[in-house]
Image (cartoon, rainbow, N blue to C red):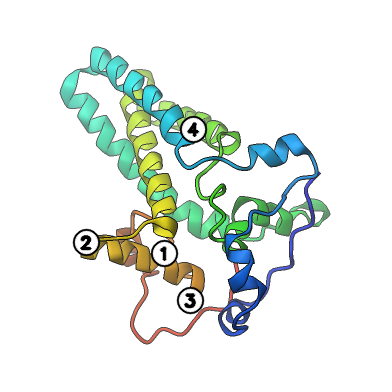
Amino acid sequence: RVRDAPAPRPWSEHMTQGPGPQTDEALDASPRLFESDLLDKLSRVHHLTPVIINTPIIVGLLFYSLMLNGVPFMLFGLVIGYLAWTLTEYFSHRYLFHTIFPLPFGLGPRFQFLIHGVHHIYPNDPLRLVMPPLLSVPSMLIALTIIRLLFGASFAWPVLAGFMVGYGIYDWVHYWTHYGQPKSDFAKQVKRLHMLHHFRDAEKGFGVHAIWWDYVFGTAYQKGDTPGSKAV
C-alpha cells in the first residue's frame, strides 16, 4: 500500500515560505513511501547501482551488435539510441513526471507523487536521485519493444545500447547536479539550470543533461522570468 502523498502546493509557496521544514529538514529527508518494508526498500537505490547493472549489459549489447552489424552500423545505432534517450528524458520529464493524470479512484496525485513529486518535495534524498531497478528494468523492456518495432531485430541492439548509455549519463548527471561540485563553466551551467527547475520554476528546464532541448522547445530559462506556479 502506498502512503498518502502530501497535497501539491503552489510553487510560489515553496519560494516564499522561508526557513522551515522545506529548507531545513525535507530537502535532505528520505521519506517512507510504502507501508510494505520490501517495496519501500526497493524504492531506494545507491547512485552507483545503475552503473553496476547496466555497464555489462551495454558491453554485451555492443559486442553482439558488432558481430551482427559491423562497426559503422554499431556506431550509428549508438548515436540514434542516445538521441532517442535525450528526447525521452525531455518529454517524460515535461509531460509525464509533471502531470497529474485523472486516474480512477483519485490515484492521479499519488501516481505523480511516486514517480516524481516526491523528488521535488525531498530533492536531496540521496537514495532517490537515480531510477531504481524496480522502474528502470520495465522501462528498458518497453524501450526494447518499441525499438525492435521501429528498427528491426538486428539493428535494435546497438540502438538499445545507445539508449541505455543515455540513461546512464542522465542518472549520473542528475545525482551530480545535487551533490557534485562543478568546475567548468558548462558544468556550472548544467547544475544551475537544474537547481532553477527545483527552486525557481518547475515549469521550465526539463532537460537534466540534455539541456539543449529546452532551447529547441521553448522551455529554457530567460532573464527576467517570474517563478511559475506549479509545485511539481
Type of amino acid under label 1 = His
Residue 7, image x, y percentages: 74, 67
Type of amino acid under label 3 = Arg
Q: Secondary structure at mark 1?
A: helix
Which of label 4 and label 2 is nearer to you?
2
CA distance separating discs 4 and 3: 32 Å
Q: Which mark is residue 140?
A: 4
CA distance separating discs 4 and 2: 32 Å
Type of amino acid under label 2 = Ser
Q: Quadrant of residue 70?
A: top left
Which of label 4 and label 3 is nearer to you?
3
> Which residue in the structure is indicated by mark 3?
200
Residue 197, image x, y percentages: 46, 68
Q: Secondary structure at mark 2?
A: loop
Residue 123, image x, y percentages: 55, 61
Q: Which mark is residue 204?
A: none
> Which residue in the structure is indicated by mark 2?
184
Q: Nearer the viewer, residue 42 or 99?
A: 42
Q: Quadrant of residue 192?
A: bottom left
Q: Secondary structure at mark 3?
A: loop
Query: Is residue 188 among the parts visible in the rendering?
Result: yes
Q: Residues within 10 Å of mark 2 (few under 14, many from 20)?
A: few
Q: Are marks 2 and 3 in contact (CB under 8 Å)?
A: no
> Which residue in the structure is indicated by mark 1?
194
CA distance separating discs 2 and 3: 23 Å
Answer with left or right where residue 171 lies relative to residue 138: left
Answer with left or right where residue 207 lies relative to residue 103: left
Q: Are marks 4 and 2 in contact (CB under 8 Å)?
A: no
